[in-house]
Image (cartoon, rainbow, N blue to C red):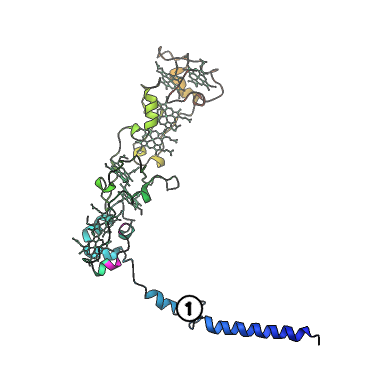
C-alpha cells in the first residue's frame, strides 16, 4: 500500500471527528425538531414584548376617532403608522402616551410629489404648499377632506398662465384650446384635458381665408410651416412671429 494512503485516511478521520464535535457543541438542542430551524425559537420570539397593538385595540378607548377614520380618506392608514408603536400605551394609558406628529415632517412621507406614486394619489409640493404652517392647521389628520377645488387653471399651472399673460394670446382662455372636465381639477393625472392635434385648429383664427378677425395676423395654412405642427415652431402659450 502506498504510504500516502494511511496519511490521507488519518486526515479524513480527524476532519470527521472535528465535524461531529462541532455539530454536537454548536448546533442548538431543539434544531430540527419541527423543521430546518430551532424549535425553541418560536417560544423566544413570542416572548418578545409586543410593540404594536393594532388599530382594533385603539378603538376600545378612542371610539370617536377610530370611527371617524374608518369612513375618511385615511381609512387605509392605521393609527400606529402615525402615532408609532403603542402597545405599552394600551396597558398603561396615562403613564405612557404615544407621540402625535404635529409638525410638517410626517405627512410628506406619503404626500410629497413623487412621479413613481400611483396616478391620482393626492400629492403636494412640500416646499411650495403653504410653507411653514403645520399640515394639521388646515387638514384634520383623522379625516382629511378632499380639498376645495381650485377655480382657476393658474392655481396649478402658474408658469404657463404667467407666460400667456404677457403674450399675444393673453386674451385667449385656456379652455379655448383645451377641453378640461371639472374632474381634471380634482384628479388631474387621471382626467387629462385635450390638446390641439391638428394645424387646422390654429387655422380657425389664423388662416387667410378666415375673414372674421381682421386684427388677427394671418398665414397661408396650406403652405406656412408645412408639414410641421404649428406648436413645433410657435410656443402656443407665448407665440412669437419670428
Ligand atoms: C385602555 C384605553 C386606551 C387604549 C386601548 C388606547 N388609548 Fe390612547 N389614550 C388613552 C388615555 C386615557 C389617554 C390620555 C387622555 C388624556 O391625556 O386626556 C390617551 C391618549 C392618547 C393620545 C394622545 C397623546 C397626546 O399627546 O395627547 C394618543 C395619540 C393615543 N392615545 C393614541 C392611541 C393609539 C394609537 C392607540 C391604539 C394603539 C391607543 N391610544 C389605545 C387610553 C387608551
Ligand atoms: C395620518 C396620521 C394619523 C393617523 C392615521 C391617526 N392619527 Fe391620531 N393624531 C395625528 C395627529 C397629527 C394628531 C395631533 C392633532 C392635533 O394636535 O390637533 C393626532 C392626535 C390624536 C389624539 C389626541 C387627541 C386629539 O384629537 O388631538 C389621539 C387620542 C389620537 N390621535 C388617536 C388616534 C387613533 C386612535 C387613531 C386610529 C384610529 C389615529 N389617531 C390615527 C395623526 C394621526
Ligand atoms: C402612510 C401614508 C400617509 C400618511 C403618513 C399621511 N397620509 Fe394623507 N392620505 C394617505 C392615503 C392612502 C390617502 C387616500 C388617497 C386616496 O384616496 O387615493 C390620503 C388622503 C389624504 C388627503 C385627501 C386628499 C384628497 O384629495 O382626497 C389629505 C388632505 C391628506 N391625506 C392629508 C394628510 C396629512 C395632513 C397628513 C399628516 C397628518 C397625512 N395625510 C399623512 C396616506 C397618508
Ligand atoms: C394654510 C392651509 C394649508 C396647509 C398648512 C396645508 N394645506 Fe394642504 N391643502 C390646502 C388647500 C386649500 C388645498 C386644496 C387646494 C390646493 O391644492 O392648493 C390643499 C390640498 C392638499 C392635498 C390634496 C392635493 C391633491 O392634489 O389632491 C394634500 C395631499 C395636502 N393638501 C396635504 C398637505 C400636507 C402634507 C401639508 C403639510 C406639509 C399641507 N397640506 C399643508 C391647505 C393647506
Ligand atoms: C389641481 C391642480 C390643477 C388644476 C386646477 C388644473 N390642472 Fe391641468 N394638470 C394638472 C396636473 C397635475 C397635470 C399633469 C401634469 C403632468 O403629468 O405632467 C395637468 C395637465 C394638464 C394638461 C396636459 C395634459 C397632457 O396630456 O399633457 C393640460 C392641457 C391641462 N392640464 C390644462 C388645464 C386647464 C385648461 C385647466 C383649467 C381649466 C387646468 N389644467 C387646471 C393639474 C391641474
Ligand atoms: C392658443 C391655444 C392655447 C391656449 C390659449 C393654451 N394652450 Fe396649453 N397648449 C396648447 C397646445 C397646442 C399645446 C401642445 C403643445 C405640444 O404638444 O407641444 C398645449 C400644451 C399644454 C400643456 C402640456 C404641457 C406643455 O407645456 O406642453 C399644458 C399643461 C397646458 N397646455 C396648459 C394650458 C393652460 C393652463 C392654459 C391657460 C393658462 C393654456 N394651456 C392655454 C395650446 C394652448
Ligand atoms: C381663438 C383665436 C386664436 C386661436 C385658436 C389661436 N390664435 Fe394665435 N393669435 C390670436 C390673436 C387674436 C393674436 C394676436 C393678438 C394681438 O397681438 O393682437 C394671435 C397671435 C399669434 C401669433 C403672433 C403673431 C405676431 O404678430 O407676432 C402667433 C405666432 C400665433 N398666434 C400662433 C398661434 C398658434 C400656433 C395657434 C394654435 C396653437 C394659435 N395661434 C391659435 C388668436 C388665436
Ligand atoms: C417650420 C416652423 C413653423 C411652423 C410649423 C409654423 N410657423 Fe408660423 N411662423 C414661422 C416663422 C419663422 C414666422 C415668422 C416669419 C414669417 O412671417 O413667415 C411665422 C409667423 C407666423 C405668424 C405671424 C404672421 C404675421 O403676418 O405676423 C402667424 C400668425 C403664424 N406664424 C401662425 C402659425 C400657425 C397657425 C401655424 C400652424 C398652422 C404655424 N404658424 C406653423 C414658423 C413656423
Residue range highlighted in magenta: 82-88
Percent of width and height locating residue 187 = 36, 42
- Taking depth in this image into account, of 7 and 242 the one nearest to the observer is 7
Percent of width and height locating residue 58 = 26, 63
- Taking depth in this image into account, of 81 and 206 the one nearest to the observer is 81
When asked about the image quadrant of residue 154, the answer is: top left
Residue displayed at 32% across by 59% down: 78
Q: Which residue is mark 1?
A: 38
Say whether residue 235 is magenta: no
Percent of width and height locating residue 223 = 55, 17
Percent of width and height locating residue 110 = 37, 50
On screen, residue 182 above or below 64: above
Residue displayed at 26% across by 48% down: 136
* Disc 1 Cβ-to-ligand 1 distance below 8 Å: no
Q: Residues within 10 Å of mark 1 (few under 14, many from 20)?
A: some
On screen, residue 74 above or below 130: below
The quadrant of the picture showing ligand 6 is top left
On-image quarter of the N terminus: bottom right
- Taking depth in this image into account, of 141 and 120 the one nearest to the observer is 141
Question: Seen in the image, is 89 located left or right of residue 215?
Answer: left
Residue displayed at 62% across by 85% down: 17
On screen, residue 11 above or below 182: below
Question: Seen in the image, is 235 located left or right of residue 21?
Answer: left
Amino acid at each position: 500500500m502506498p504510504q500516502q494512503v494511511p496519511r490521507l485516511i488519518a486526515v479524513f478521520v480527524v476532519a470527521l471527528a472535528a465535524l461531529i464535535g462541532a455539530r454536537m457543541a454548536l448546533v442548538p438542542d431543539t434544531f430540527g425538531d419541527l423543521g430546518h430551524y430551532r424549535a425553541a425559537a418560536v417560544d423566544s420570539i413570542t416572548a418578545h414584548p409586543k410593540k404594536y397593538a393594532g388599530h382594533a385595540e385603539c378603538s376600545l378607548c378612542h371610539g370617536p376617532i377610530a370611527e371617524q377614520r374608518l369612513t375618511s380618506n385615511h381609512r387605509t392608514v392605521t393609527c400606529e403608522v402615525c402615532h408609532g408603536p403603542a402597545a405599552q400605551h394600551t396597558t398603561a394609558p396615562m403613564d405612557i402616551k404615544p407621540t402625535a406628529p404635529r409638525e410638517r415632517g410626517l405627512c410628506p412621507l406619503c404626500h410629497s410629489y413623487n412621479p413613481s406614486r400611483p396616478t391620482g394619489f393626492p400629492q403636494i409640493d412640500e416646499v411650495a404648499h403653504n410653507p411653514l404652517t403645520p399640515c394639521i392647521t388646515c387638514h384634520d389628520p383623522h379625516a382629511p377632506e378632499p380639498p376645495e377645488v381650485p377655480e382657476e387653471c393658474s392655481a396649478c399651472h402658474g408658469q404657463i398662465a404667467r407666460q400667456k399673460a404677457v403674450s399675444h394670446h393673453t386674451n385667449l382662455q385656456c379652455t379655448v384650446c383645451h377641453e378640461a372636465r371639472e374632474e381634471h381639477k380634482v384628479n388631474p393625472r387621471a382626467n387629462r384635458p385635450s390638446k390641439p392635434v391638428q394645424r387646422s385648429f390654429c387655422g380657425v383664427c389664423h388662416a387667410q381665408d378666415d375673414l372674421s378677425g381682421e386684427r388677427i395676423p394671418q398665414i397661408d395654412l396650406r403652405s406656412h410651416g408645412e408639414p410641421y405642427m404649428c406648436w413645433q415652431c410657435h410656443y402656443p402659450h407665448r407665440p412669437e412671429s419670428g
